[in-house]
Amino acid sequence: MHDETLALYPEPAQPAAAAPQQVDRRELFEFRGSAREYFRIWIVNLALSLVTLGIYSAWASVRTRRYFYANTWFAGSPFEYSAQPLPILRGRLIAVLVFGCYILADRISPWLKLAAAGVVAVVLPWLLVRGLAFRARYSSWRGLPFRFEPDFKGAYIWYLAIYVLMIPTIGLIYPWIKKRQQQWVVQHHNYGNSKFDFEADVEDYYLVLFATIGIAILAMLIMAAAAAMGMGIAHAADIDLKRHPLLFLLAMYAIYLPAYLAIYSYNRSRILNLLYNGVRLAGGRLRSTLGFWAMFWIYLSNLVSITCTAGLAVPWAKVRMVRYRTSHIVLETAGDLDAFVAETRAQTDVGALGAEMDGFFSIDIGL
Amino acid sequence: MTSIVGTYHDGRSSRAHAVEVECAGGMLHTFGNEVDRSDPLARVVPSAPLSGVPFTLRFADGARVQLPADAPVGEWFPRHHRIEKRVSGWERRGSIAALAVLVVALALAATFIWGVPAVADYAAMHMPTTADRVLGNQSLALMRSHWLRPSTLPEARRAELQQRFREFAAHTGDTGHLSLEFYDSPALGANAFSLGGGIIVVTDALVRTLPDDNAFLAVVAHEMGHQHYRHTLRMVLRGSGVVLVVSVLAGDVSGSTLATAIPVFLLNAHYSRDFEEQADSYAFAALERASISPMAFVRAMRALETAHPELRDDADARYLSTHPVTQERIERALAAAQQFQRNRASAITLPRRSSSRSGSSRSGSTSAGRHPTRSPARP
């Protein structure tokens, strides 16, 4: 479950010279798209993608992203997504090929799977950098593009080598790794010639981890109780579950899904809050106030409505989630949002392979 | 000629300028707050139309101007984005959206019912048999470490069955790579399954449950059918294809893994039922070639349904099951047996062939009940 909304990309901000006596303004993010409008875009593009055996899907994905970016407004101006479909098509074809081999290896033999996972782990940081660079390169606000500085060495340190430390610390180092990963991602982003910075306390990451474990234990207890109760009801009503596999399956889902989503929503909302709250740009800072219960409710009701409508509710579900997320982020700044300036050097084009690949391998860059 | 209100960005700073834009005589005029420029249309790149999204016109120097989504930009640039202009028109119409729902439903059905199986089977045909063997050995190793123990059948009995199996297999032409293996498995009960690469596993309980050796051969013949058609490898490829297509489609949809789990499961069960039917047909043909009546298959099914009474199912479970409902299988076996008898009769009494058409092809199915068996199950 990655990228469930769209990489709500950019966090712009304001430039230097934040006079200390000024009171911080709050500049709002806002999503202005509508589920009705997006439904038509989605279904027409999906139909075309299927009819063209996937070729059109590159155009479809550009149109989708353009719709979401252009309807995300910040301080009175929309974001813009300007990638071209052809490079995306190329990247997507390679990604499908690689992912196909990976699934196959997974099913044929555990050793092949291990080898494939090894290969993926080694190329993953490289793909991550390329993916981030691609997204940033083609995202802009008020005519200025974002940029991600391609730091391959950092990617290999923070997304591969560092995991060695998980073994001696029996995983206790994970929150610190997570923090450093977010920091690495944010600090390599620029808007115009302004660099993003990142400030966060590692203690907060530990609190999130422990709370997540606590919720997981609680959820498991509730699940066990619910399962026992369900079995009791089935027994009392003289229903032999073995003879009703459909009923049994549905009951399993009814118990398992809310528990899973609760754990997921908690972790997701808190980690996103940590990420956004850490973002600094030219004297300004983001404030993110995503709520656990709100996210949980959106995920759960989205899932139920998507299942009940055989997928037709997907556009509505997506719009809801994006709308919630954008409405809970603000930029606190005292500076002038008109004063960002472009970099002097021009940006070169970036290949789309990384950006396409991470969709398949669930590289969670947490944006 | 009217001008259109837009927002101008010079590409050097984040400052927005309110401007008006006019298009006349092959030139685009942009003027307003500190901006006044005229560019030939050939030096301006427009974005593709998309409802609810403003147009962006990009100038050669990196500046751009945003115009409302309903601006007549398409008329200014008749040669740009021809396909997307048409798509954009479709996206604005409810009737086209309704049509698209239908197209998506049909296309998805076609993809999963024909597309994925066809591509997967084509790929399987072009894969070396080593692939099946690797698969089979891996699954066997896995099963041995979990559910299989050495067989407790008497050595002589096993040798006898092996002998019968070899004789039987000789009739089918599928001999070379097949290997029949016996294991004791309390967890799996009376069961037989086919792993890739010619490995057929039979549990001790199955041997004890079946009434006679021909019934045993009927079950083994079903598993040989799976081997003959390389069902294990094809199932692996089809399953991978489904995951791949679903991943591409679901891409960035919220909760996609959870929401698609049930459809994916049902789809795999659907493919599996097809394979079971094919293996049954193979078994009937193989039995006939060895001059054994497919009634042996019926006897095997009935013996197994007695051995596993807890596995009775309801008709509504049909789409969940990896195997066809047993009643249907028994009926098909009975029909095959009928045909077998007729062929036999006509072979013996050649001259009176024409009178043998009257027999009902459906006799004896009344007592079959609707009991499934797990017998020729694959893991």
Image (cartoon, grey):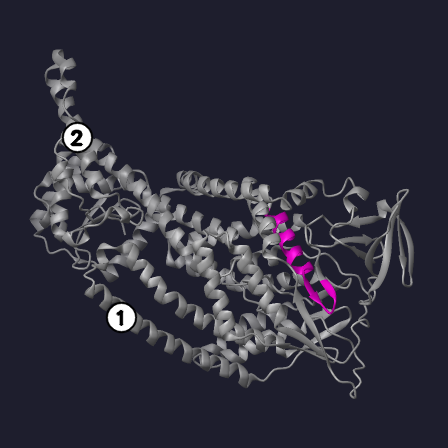
Q: Amino acid at mark 2?
A: Arg
The image shows residue A29 at horizontal and vertical percentages of 67, 69
Residue that carries the numbered disc 2 in the rendered image: B362
Q: Amino acid at mark 1?
A: Met
Of all chains, the one bearing label 2 is B
Q: Quadrant of residue B197?
A: top left
Instruction: Give the CA distance from mark 1 to mark 2.
Output: 46 Å
User: Judging from the image, what secondary structure is the residue with disc 2 in?
Assistant: loop
Please state the extent of the stretch shown in magenta in the rendering: A57-78
Q: Looking at the image, is A300 positioned above or below residue B224?
A: below
Q: Looking at the image, is A73 positioned above or below residue B45?
A: below
Please tell me how crowded label 1 is: few (under 14), some (14-19), or many (20+) other residues with Cα within 10 Å.
few
Q: Is residue B285 located in the magenta-colored stretch of the structure?
A: no
B165 relative position to B99: left or right:
left
Q: Which mark is residue B271?
A: none
Q: Which mark is residue A229?
A: 1
Which one is closest to the eye, mark 1 or mark 2? 1
Please tell me how crowded label 2 is: few (under 14), some (14-19), or many (20+) other residues with Cα within 10 Å.
few
